[in-house]
Amino acid sequence: MLARVASAAVLGIDAYLVDVETDIANGLPSFATVGLPHGAVKEGRERVNSAIHNAGYLFPLQRITVNLAPADIRKEGSAFDLPIALGILAATGQIDAKGLRGFLVMGELGLDGEVRPIRGALSMAVAAEQAGCTGMILPAANVREAAVVGALDVRGARTLAEVVRHLDGGPPLARASVDLDALFAARASDDVDFLEVKGQEHAKRALEVAAAGAHNLLMVGPPGSGKTMLARRLPTILPAMAVAEALETTKVHSVAGMLPPGESLIATRPFRSPHHTISDAGLIGGGSYPRPGEVSLAHHGVLFLDELPEFRTNVLEVLRQPMEDGAVTLSRAAMSLSYPARFMLAAAMNPCPCGFHGSTVRGCGCTPTEVRRYLARVSGPLLDRIDLHLDVPAVAYRQLSDERSGEPSAAIRERVSRARAMQQERFAGRRGVFANAHMAPRDIRACCRLTDGADAILRTAITRLGLSARAYHRTLKIARTIADLAAAVAIEPLHVSEAIQYRTLDRGIP
């Protein structure tokens, strides 16, 4: 007898529907799974066998064939356990499969029949809605995540027996629902705030400019000057996440298996800070069956790389493509996957190996050769993709002991949001351009109009300071953002003057 149960699988951060076809025929007892199953899918037959037995149902001693269609895409993960078990029970007449019409089913089974959580539930829910399905049956631990897609009838199960009783007309599985507005409101508060930062007014202004234009930022300063403290507060001044951004970010974390238990939506900007010993695969993603890396987990948020020169050269160089394209493409022999990676890079480094080159507080023992070699660990092409180079000096005692608090993040975020709104209006209809940092040369020509005074200052900077052509374009982008913060149509001399200050490494560290 043949039974069909609809399920889904994840490919990248998106999902596609899978038909789980179960055929039971006379012959020697066997259990074959076809349709390019891999790893945990193949092992699922042992979990399904034990789960059916221990849940009090009969496992047929016949020839069982399970086909996962489409059969030309490799299937990964343990989410097919529950649909396979229901397919076997339906094919043997132990349950009525009519209750599964229009529903997607997924879930991992324990040997005792427990339904355990899976990865990618949100992606599967989106795919189910797009395919016109009416609902989903999935592990109870994943229901809040899938219920974010409000058009679906999402029902969670804790055991295989609960699902069977639901299909046989017994107690129905509980339906899940989520209030998106309440979710965003509950996660509106941040654990850190800019009002906790003492001094560093110049640095805080630079971070405001970076946030307003989605510019990448490099902070250079001695140990203890507050570079990490500033970077950790950068997400608190970014504009609030839109629903579409939250859904896409949650998809990435769900597929990676990093969505916190009971969490249904990531409604705050992610902040990722990998250690400098990370591998290139850990940073951009990879593996025999590719998983998202740190750049994708930081999607719509901030990727902070502390002690930038301590990262291995090959690790830093793989950042160049995602910083340029806003996505990561991982190619393998059997497949090619793309993960989103539209993040802001915030990096920090010391000016020399000891960290005190140019300091007025403590002497530096590094030779000029050692300083140059240390700075050369960060390649020119990578620096070319970082708009703001910021000098962060040590904080004076009088600033540390000042009991007055600084400006709160909420006030800075309000200005940043207004500037971003201007940019969204300016770039409406331009594909791939959402903020000033994303402008191509043609966009710079069209959007960065200089007054005569501003043009004269920039010409002088290029000539006297020896700024390169790449520094010219970066300066224009930064000046455009500063003008947006001031709600100015044209770029004025004051805007250009401030922008030039944020190109420290173009002149070399004194």
Image (cartoon, rainbow, N blue to C red):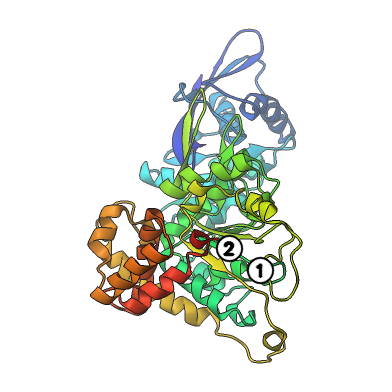
Residue found at x 54% / y 67% = 390
Q: 35 and 308: which one is in front?
A: 308
Residue found at x 64% / y 26% = 39
Disc 2 + disc 1, Cβ < 8 Å = yes
Residue 127 coordinates in the image, percent (x, y): 42, 43
98 relative position to 372: left or right = left
What residue is pinned by disc 1? 358
Three-letter code, disc 1: Gly
* Dot 2 or dot 1, earlier in sequence: 1
Is disc 1 placed on a helix, strand or loop? loop
Three-letter code, disc 2: Ile
The count of marks equals 2
- The 10 Å Cα crowd at callout 1, few under 14, some 14 to 19, many 20 or more, is some
Residue 193 coordinates in the image, percent (x, y): 60, 77
What residue is pinned by disc 2? 509
Q: Is residue 165 visible?
A: no
Vertical arrangement, residue 125 with respect to residue 205, above or below: above
Q: 218 and 214: which one is in front?
A: 218
